[in-house]
Image (spheres, rainbow, N blue to C red):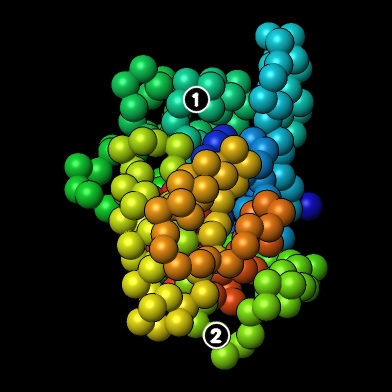
Amino acid sequence: EFTVKFLLIQLRRIGDVLMTTPSIRLLRKSFPEAEVSFLTEAPADQVLRNSPFLDKIYLYPKVNTIKESISFVQNLREQQFDCVIDFFGNPRSALMTFFSGAPLRIGFDFRGRRWAYTNRVKISTHLTYAAQDKTQLLAELGIFTNDFRLDFFSDNKDEEFADRLFGSLGVFDSDFVVSLSPVSRQPYKVWPLERFANVADWLIKKYEAKILFLFGPGEEHFVDKVRAFMKQKALPSYEIPSLSETLSILKRVDLHLGNDNGIVHFAVA
């Protein structure tokens, strides 16, 4: 019995991996019997771990020698994929797409990378939602959609984590809880921290809001500065949660405010 095998590639950035989830869902819907695999890097794989639409997740090793890289690509090639879709489109993912040996290789028509693909998709000149942008690659398979909702699935352990956390912070169901994420790896995406503090103070005074900060490893300094600017008291910090635990927190809050970062995409999901 012949099974069509797909490999989807989006190596990094948590938000960008999340933006591929409408495409994963659409592909599964269009090819219910196919084997659908995804290649990414840690920690972005956490976004996909509970997805019912994927059969396998391949983790690209971050630190590797040329020998290890060749071995990894050889392993991919041995899987004999029928179609590889490169959502990432950087030189490394283009190379892996090409050397996968798949007869159908779909990617964006980036200069210097187009040689890697059998089917090249022109880059849209219109400003579109990133999730919509990525689904353009599926048009090569005759798949079109207006459904760009993001998928991110938490499990019972994550929900229990949120229950315990809110209990330990003294947060009740009746409270108005606002999550605040003043962080970003890109300096140009950081709204002034004193403005986050002003908004947080206003929400506490006017609505008796409980302010819960969301941040990742190495991002505590953003939160510390906002706390220093605030006149009111926010909820205390806690151990940094996993990505799916962060999702379970966002399911429980009433409002999210933050920079353009991975967490804002979780809030959308």
Return the disc, 1 or 2, that comes first in the chain's sequence: 1
Q: Report the side of 82 relative to 58 (left or right).
A: left
Q: Residue at x 55, y 57 (%)?
A: 214
Look at mark 1 in the image and give the residue it sits on: 94
Identify whether 66 is placed above or below 155.
above
Q: Report the side of 151 relative to 241 (left or right).
A: left
Marking on residue 175: 2
Q: Is residue 67 visible?
A: yes
Amino acid tagged 2: Asp
Image-quadrant location for residue 54: bottom right
Q: Residue at x 60, y 31 (%)?
A: 102
Viewer-proximal residue among 212 and 42: 212
Mark 1 secondary-structure assignment: helix
Viewer-proximal residue among 123 and 119: 123
Image-quadrant location for residue 113: top left
Viewer-proximal residue among 260 and 83: 260
Q: Pinpoint residue 43: horizontal percent, then vertical percent.
A: 66, 42
